[in-house]
Image (spheres, grey):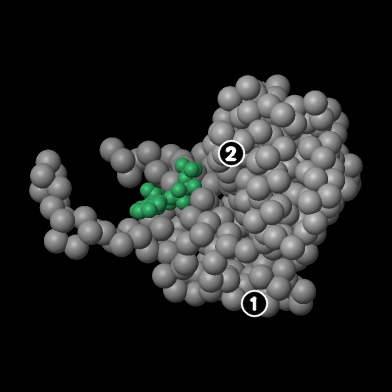
């Protein structure tokens, strides 16, 4: 439960010691380009470039559950989108199993906060469509059995023929998770998957994700705003600094034994120290973001 390292520069050294890094983020910076020559009629300002991320370095070993936490707007989604291959970094590179990423791939399944389901397809069809897209050669029988395997895994048996509008938020997110897992990715990327859910449903789904992770042992990178969620699920917690030019402040190791239970998590050695450290970090960074706005 000790800190991995203090500064992002040191992180590179410390974490590049992972020989078998599955995900390697190397010197990654991301600049969103302003519209040159465009002048806002109200503020009379030109649209400037925005440096979202600056020189991010860290490695993730296989089968690790990593959460990313940081103040709003610090670049968490940008970082996840770079790992997903949905966005290319302005400089630096992301590697998966040693290969540089240029686009999304079946080795990386993505779960979005807003579910991103196809509303005209049923639950089963949403999964089927994803499997068919990634594995066009797979036989119909195998595709169907895979659809039902994952529907069962996330506890949606009986809801196969329902359309997304007939489902609760928690059920929709189960479909999102099942769809991402059904393509059997090595890596699961989740952008605040429980952010839109009420506290109770969120708790249920956290437990489900923990259970599925025990079973499937994918490498997971998940964004969260919840300290408790991060402590319940993670092996490592990446704490990001505020932007612009956001970077990594610290990476915390969470060594609580698994399977974990939310009921007694706060009795684990080091729990309160880790929680206090995260609270301090988020308070400090969020306060600075607010101060910059005034
Ligand atoms: N396409 C874009 N063009 C310009 N700026 C962008 C774009 N996408 C994100 N940004 C800016 O980059 C910064 C990082 O955004 P990002 O969504 O990655 O942060 P975040 O940490 O995920 O935020 P939140 O916690 O609020 O979801 C923000 O200041 C955002 O306004």
- Density class for disc 1 (Cα within 10 Å; few <14, some 14-19, many ≥20) is few
Does the beta carbon of the residue at mark 2 sit less than 8 Å from ligand 1?
no
Q: Is residue 278 above or below residue 82?
A: above
- How many neighbours does mark 2 have within 10 angstroms: few (below 14), some (14-19), or many (20 or more)? some
Q: Nearer the viewer, residue 35 or 25?
A: 35
Residue at mark 1: 99
Residue 14 visible in the displayed image? no
Residue 86 at x, y = what percent?
51, 59
- The structure residue drawn at horizontal position 84% and vertical position 36%, both measured from the top left corner, is 152
Element at label 2 = loop
Query: Whole-percent x and y of residue 145?
Result: 84, 46
The reply to whether residue 289 is visible in this rendering is yes
Vertical placement of residue 44 versus 171, above or below? below
Q: Which mark is residue 82?
A: none
The label shown at residue 117 is 2
- Residue beneath the point at 66% across and 48% down: 129
């Amino acid at each position: 439960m000790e800190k991995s390292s203090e500064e992002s520069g040191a992180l590179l050294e410390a974490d590049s010691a992972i020989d078998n890094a599955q995900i390697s983020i190397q010197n990654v910076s991301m600049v969103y380009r302003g519209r040159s020559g465009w002048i806002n009629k109200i503020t009379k300002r030109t649209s400037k470039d925005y440096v979202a991320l600056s020189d991010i370095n860290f490695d993730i070993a296989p089968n690790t559950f990593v959460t990313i936490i940081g103040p709003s707007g610090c670049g968490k989604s940008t970082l996840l989108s770079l790992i997903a291959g949905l966005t290319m970094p302005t400089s630096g590179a992301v590697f998966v199993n040693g290969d540089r990423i240029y686009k999304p791939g079946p080795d990386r399944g993505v779960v979005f906060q807003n579910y991103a389901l196809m509303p005209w397809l049923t639950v089963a069809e949403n999964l089927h469509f994803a499997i068919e897209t990634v594995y066009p050669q797979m036989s119909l029988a195998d595709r169907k059995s895979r659809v039902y395997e994952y529907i069962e895994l996330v506890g949606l048996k009986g809801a196969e023929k329902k359309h997304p509008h007939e489902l609760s938020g928690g059920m929709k997110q189960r479909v999102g998770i099942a769809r991402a897992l059904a393509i059997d990715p090595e890596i699961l990327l989740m952008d605040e998957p429980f952010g839109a859910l009420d506290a109770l449903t969120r708790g249920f789904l956290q437990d489900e994700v923990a259970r599925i992770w025990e079973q499937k042992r994918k490498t997971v990178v998940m964004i969260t705003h919840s300290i408790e969620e991060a402590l319940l699920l993670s092996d490592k917690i990446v704490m990001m600094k505020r932007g612009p030019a956001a970077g990594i402040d610290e990476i915390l190791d969470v060594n609580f034994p698994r399977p974990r239970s939310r009921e007694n998590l706060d009795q684990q050695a080091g729990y309160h120290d880790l929680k206090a450290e995260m609270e301090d970090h988020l308070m400090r960074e969020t306060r600075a973001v607010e101060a910059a706005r005034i």
